Amino acid sequence: MFRRRTRGRTRKAALLLTGLSAAVLSVVGLRRRRTKGSPMADSKTIVRQLLEDPWKGNWGVIDEYLAPGYIGHDPSQPQPIRGIDGLKANFQQYIDAFTGAHITVIEQIAEDDVIASRWTASGTHTGEIAGIAPTGKDVTISGITISKLEGGRVIEEWVNWDTFGMLVQLGAIPMPATA
């Protein structure tokens, strides 16, 4: 009789330890996903480089990390931005219009294959943009880009940035009255 009780307790203890081990491994696995070298961290790095590096002259990141069938949704553009060449042309129009233009990613949130990035951009308006002649004014705006990745490449993005604020800073439209 004593033996049976011991065996029953041993089995219960073994099951408890197995359950605890599984819980610990699952927590370790969650932590591991959020550290460098993980798919989530790598996706954030890919998106950060795509947002920041072209302004520094590194166009190779677009070729490396953008899917050929890329579609970019930007409310300031009349049509979606399509493909690698389309994104390069979109960057180029702003690089030509703003000397020293750059984007700095402030914060990123990742879930599965979707990365949300909050950023600021600034530069000096020295070239024509959207029919606005150069003003020499410094401009700083903020925006959010939501990027969807597939196989380590960005396949689609939705961007929302302070177009109105840029136009006010350039003097293209008057500052709205305050209440």
Image (cartoon, rainbow, N blue to C red):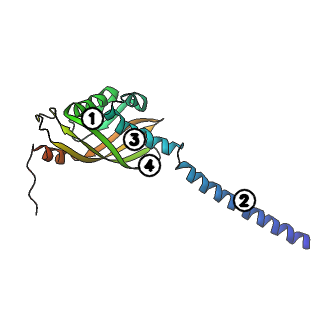
Q: Is residue 123 left or right of residue 61?
A: left
From the top left corner, tell me how far across and down residue 61 is, in percent.
40, 31
Q: Residue furthest bottom?
A: 1
Q: Residue at x 14, y 32 (%)?
A: 128
How many numbered marks have been drawn onto this rendered protein structure? 4
Distance (Cα) linking label 4 and label 1: 24 Å
From the top left corner, tell me how far across and down residue 82 is, in percent.
31, 30
Q: Which of marks 4 and 1 is nearer the N terminus?
A: 1
Q: Which of marks 2 and 3 is nearer the N terminus?
A: 2
Badge 3 is on which residue?
48
Badge 1 is on which residue?
80
Q: Is mark 2 on a helix, strand or loop?
A: helix
Q: In this view, does 128 lie above or below 7?
A: above
Q: Is residue 178 above or below residue 32?
A: below
Badge 4 is on which residue?
110
Q: In the image, what residue type sits under mark 2?
A: Thr
